Amino acid sequence: MFDVSVIEEPAAAEVALDPVRARLLALLGEPHSATSLAALVGLPRQKVNYHLKALEAHGLVELVEERRKGNMTERVLRAAAASFVISPIALSAVQPDPARSPDRLSARWLLALAARLVRETGQLITGAEKAGKPVATFALDGTVRFASAADRAAFAQELTAAVTALVSRYHDEAAPGGREHRVIVAIHPSIPEEPRND
């Protein structure tokens, strides 16, 4: 089971967003049969089985084992990933495009960049899985507390200069066999995490 999987197909996104199926996906972090899930969600086994078939048809759940129970075979399934992200590709006609309004100070532009990051990373993961190779990525995630808006602006200016200097030093347009990598640096106000009720 993967930690995170990207849903790129519109039909798979529709299946995953159904409230009953989303609940089943959450429960399928651990292997379950239709019978055990039915007891947990309070639905008839046949109804649960119907939802499981839809999830399985789109690769959102996978077969773990089959058990013989009398004259029946019980199928035990689990989610294909612990969590899922829906790629903007699933909404290809209306997916965000940062080129439409490249305002570096706009939260909506940041959102469009984030959507592109999800789309491209999802495509890289899908391609790497098909090729049986890992994807070379790197990310930083941290928090900084600014004393004032002026400090935040000065930080953004210094960060821009530092990243620009690094890119200038390492970018080689003519490198034979070189591969371009996208660099995204973002700053946004933090949202306090709410305690989870697991």
Image (tube, rainbow, N blue to C red):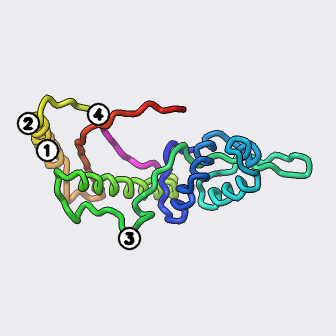
Q: Could you tell me how far apart the alpha carbons at marks 2 and 4 are, in whole angstroms?
A: 20 Å
Q: Earlier in the sequence, mark 3 or mark 4?
A: 3
Q: Which residue is mark 2?
A: 150
Residue lying at 49% horizontally and 46% vertically, measured from the top left: 4
Q: Which quadrant of the structure image shows residue 162?
A: top left
Which amino acid is tagged 3?
Answer: Ala
Viewer-nearest of labels 4 and 1? 4
Residue at horizontal 52 percent and vertical 53 percent from the top? 132
Q: Image point 65% across, 57% down: which residue?
A: 56
Q: Amino acid at mark 1?
A: Thr
Give the position of the C terminus as an image quadrant.
top right
Q: Are the residues tagged 2 and 4 within 8 Å (C-beta)?
A: no
Q: Secondary structure at mark 1?
A: helix
The magenta stretch spans residue 140: yes
Q: Secondary structure at mark 3?
A: helix
Q: Residue at x 36, y 46 (%)?
A: 137
- The alpha-carbon separation of the residues under discs 3 and 2 comes to 39 Å
**Marks 3 and 1, the one that precedes in the sequence:** 3
> Which residue has dot 1 on it?
160
Q: Is residue 20 magenta?
A: no
Confirm or deny contact between disc 3 and disc 2 (CB under 8 A).
no
Judging by the rendered image, the residue that carries numbered circle 4 is 142
Q: Quadrant of the N terminus?
A: top right
Instruction: Check disc 4: other Cα within 10 Å, few if <14, some if 14-19, many if 20+.
Output: few
Query: In this rendering, is residue 89 above or below 155?
Result: below
Q: Badge 3 is on which residue?
A: 93
Which comes before the other along the chain, label 2 or label 1?
A: 2
How far is mark 4 from mark 1, CA to CA? 17 Å
Q: Amino acid at mark 2?
A: Ala
Q: Which residues are magenta?
A: 134-141
Q: Is residue 12 left or right of residue 118?
A: right
